[in-house]
Amino acid sequence: MIRWVGVAILSLVTATQAQDLRLYTIGSGDVNGSYYAAATAICQETNRVEAGLRCSPEATPGSIYNMEALRTRQLDFAIVQSDVQHMALTSEGPFDGGPPFADLRSVMSLYPETLTVLARPDAHILSLRGLVGKRVDIGLPASGRQATAMRLLESLGLDRSDFRALLQLSTGTGLDELCAGRIDATVLLLGHPSAVVARAIADCDARLVNISGPEVRAFIEANSDYVYASIPRTVYGKKGRTLSFGVLATLVTRTDMPDDIVAAITANMVANLPSVGVSAAVLENLSISDMQQSGLAAPMHPAAAATFDRLGP
């Protein structure tokens, strides 16, 4: 009898604690990608410190899906590309024809993402134009990498008919297909060093392709969402650098997200940058000043801005 009462009391306490616990989600990307790793690291840090909050990283198809799921309140926060932020605010690209996402708010900038083309060595792809006539993976339909890839290809006057095939694969599947020889190249948009890129280079001698030249320069200069970037081959045991361009991974939410939740995420990131960087390699070089400014097209959520002002340098 005493044991039953103890169990009953424990169950009541547990139920009360569960009622007090507030849950929120961060939309990320493919489980093999850097968005999922970053979202997991952010959630782990918050869950470790905040007793009343529980953060869940959600695997998704990518930035475009995340933005729409955030708009329809299926997600509370989302990691999206900086160019996708801009397109959602201005109803451009994949958001053409829809209303601007006026309630979108920035929380922080995270890390640079570089357009990364990996090709099979026997495909003899040495430049962006070398993709013409080949079998190329450009990412899932709701991914930011497909939106960016198509924006670039269209700027060069190319469409689907210029390729043997344009496939829409997840990151992991695309790399598997590349190493199996069933596609010639995959177009990625991610931070470096990347475990998936390292695996493809080690497993099937995949090659990093330079994305450069007058046409690429004109594209970058015409679109303020993009910046010049390069991939240090040394992180993959090679020499030199691969030229390309990039965007920034950013964390966003809506205007109605409670201030205390936004403040908790921001404060825990600022206070624990070293441990976050250990959890996700793409986050190891975060700068507090860049987190407040770089690539943030949407206005900053007031609670994030106040927290940066309070804890920043």
Image (cartoon, helix red, strand yellow):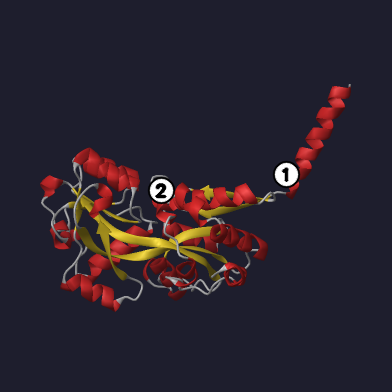
**Residue 134, visible in the rendered structure:** yes
* Neighbour tally class for label 1: few under 14, some 14-19, many 20 plus, Cα within 10 Å: few
**Residue 166, visible in the rendered structure:** no
According to the picture, the residue beneath numbered tag 2 turns out to be 30
> In the image, is 174 to the left or to the right of 40?
left
Q: Amino acid at mark 2?
A: Asp
The image shows residue 11, relative to residue 74, as above or below, that is above
16 or 242, nearer to the observer: 242
Residue 213 % position (x, y) = 16, 69
Q: Amino acid at mark 1?
A: Ala
Q: Identify the image quadrant of residue 192.
A: bottom left
169 or 207, nearer to the observer: 207
Residue 103 % position (x, y) = 56, 71
According to the picture, the residue beneath numbered tag 1 turns out to be 18
The residue that appears at 72% across and 44% down in the rendered structure is 18
The residue that appears at 45% across and 57% down in the rendered structure is 65
Residue 251 % position (x, y) = 49, 62
Specify which label sits upstream in the sequence, 2 or 1. 1
